[in-house]
């Protein structure tokens, strides 16, 4: 399994409610349409402790080949094209991570 995380900062010219609604109602279905995606979560910041981003997205892919195929797909292209509609792309951070669960959920 491959896991990617993204820090999301909403565009300042949109109200937070409008940006969040777009992230949930428009952007999320684009991600779930990507073949090979097996999980997707949106973590919305409710209180800033350190950092100024508005959310963290987590996306899981079934395998490394599935991840690599997804990044080349038209569906992933649609995800990327939609980002500027609600996110400050200059503030976007992304990484492939190795999740280590210390305490179960």
Image: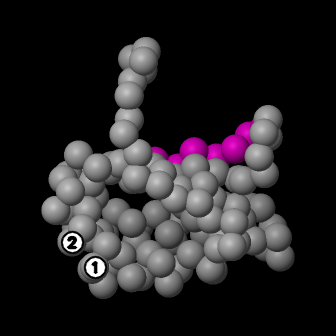
- CA separation, marks 1 and 2? 5 Å
Residue at 59% x, 60% y is 93
Percent position (x, y) of residue 63? 18, 53
Query: Above or below — where is 105 with respect to 84?
Result: above
Percent position (x, y) of residue 64? 20, 56
Specify whether 75 is left or right of 23.
Answer: left
Residue farthest top in this picture: 103
Residue at 26% x, 62% y is 67
Percent position (x, y) of residue 41? 46, 48
Query: Above or below — where is 45 with respect to 54?
Result: above
Q: Is residue 95 magenta?
A: no
Residue at 47% x, 55% y is 95
Q: Quadrant for residue 31, please give it.
A: bottom left
Closest to the observer: 12 or 97?
A: 97
Q: In the rendered image, is residue 21 in sight?
A: no
Classed neighbour count for the residue bearing mark 2: other residues with Cα under 10 Å, few (<14), some (14–19), many (≥20): some
Q: Is residue 43 magenta?
A: yes
Secondary element at image label 2: helix
Check if mark 1's residue and mark 2's residue have beta carbons within 8 Å: yes
Magenta span covers which residues?
A: 40-47
Task: Tell me the colour scheme of the image.
Answer: one colour
Classed neighbour count for the residue bearing mark 1: other residues with Cα under 10 Å, few (<14), some (14–19), many (≥20): few
Secondary element at image label 1: loop
Quarter holding the C terminus is top left
Q: Main secondary structure of the magenta part?
A: strand
Which residue in the protein does label 1 denote?
72
Which residue in the protein does label 2 denote?
69
Percent position (x, y) of residue 46? 74, 40
Q: In the rendered image, is residue 55 in sight?
A: yes
């Amino acid at each position: 399994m491959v896991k990617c995380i993204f820090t999301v900062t909403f565009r300042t010219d949109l109200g937070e409610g409008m940006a969040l609604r777009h992230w949930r109602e428009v952007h999320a279905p684009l991600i779930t349409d990507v073949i090979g995606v097996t999980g997707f979560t949106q973590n919305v910041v409710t209180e800033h402790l350190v950092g100024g981003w508005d959310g963290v997205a987590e996306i899981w892919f079934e395998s490394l080949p599935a991840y690599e195929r997804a990044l080349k797909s038209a569906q992933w292209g649609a995800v990327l094209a939609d980002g500027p509609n609600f996110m400050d792309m200059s503030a976007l951070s992304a990484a492939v991570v190795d999740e280590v669960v210390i305490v179960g959920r």
